[in-house]
Image (cartoon, grey):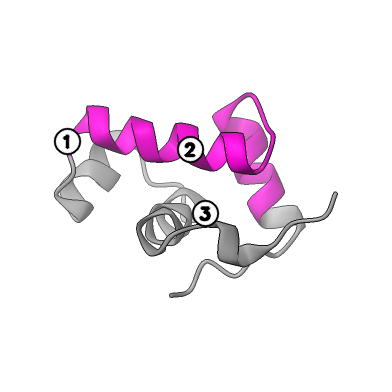
Amino acid sequence: MEFKNEELVDREKEIGRYLLEDFTIKQISEKTGLNKKTLSAHINNMMKKLKVKHISELIKLLRAKNINTQS
């Protein structure tokens, strides 16, 4: 699978870092100041961009591809 890191916006990269650190949705919401609905929208956008159907697949892809989620 080819992936261009620049497809993710800065906020998605930030969320990706938290996902890789095994933060819960509630914890990410508290850290970022985003409500859960907005956070879910960002995660869904990431999943669409990376062509995965489940958050667990998203996390596995981020880890497996060693995707740099740094801004």
For label 1, the SS is: loop
Residue annotated with mark 1: 35
- Precedes in sequence: disc 3 or disc 1: 3
The structure residue drawn at horizontal position 46% and vertical position 56%, both measured from the top left corner, is 21
Q: Which residues lie in the magenta part?
A: 35-62
Magenta stretch secondary structure, dominant:
helix
Residue 15 colored magenta? no
The mark lying in front, picked from 2 and 3, is 2
Residue 45 colored magenta? yes
Residue annotated with mark 3: 20
Binning the other alpha carbons within 10 Å of mark 2 as few (below 14), some (14 to 19) or many (20 upward) gives: some
69 lies left or right of 52? left
- Precedes in sequence: disc 2 or disc 3: 3
Disc 2 from disc 3: Cα separation:
17 Å
The structure residue drawn at horizontal position 47% and vertical position 32%, both measured from the top left corner, is 44
Disc 3 from disc 1: Cα separation:
20 Å
Binning the other alpha carbons within 10 Å of mark 3 as few (below 14), some (14 to 19) or many (20 upward) gives: some
Q: How many marks?
A: 3
Image location of residue 20, percent across then percent down? 52, 54
Residue annotated with mark 2: 45
Image location of residue 57, percent across then percent down? 67, 34
Nearer the observer, 58 or 8:
8
Image quadrant occupied by the C terminus:
bottom left
- Precedes in sequence: disc 1 or disc 2: 1
Disc 1 from disc 2: Cα separation:
16 Å
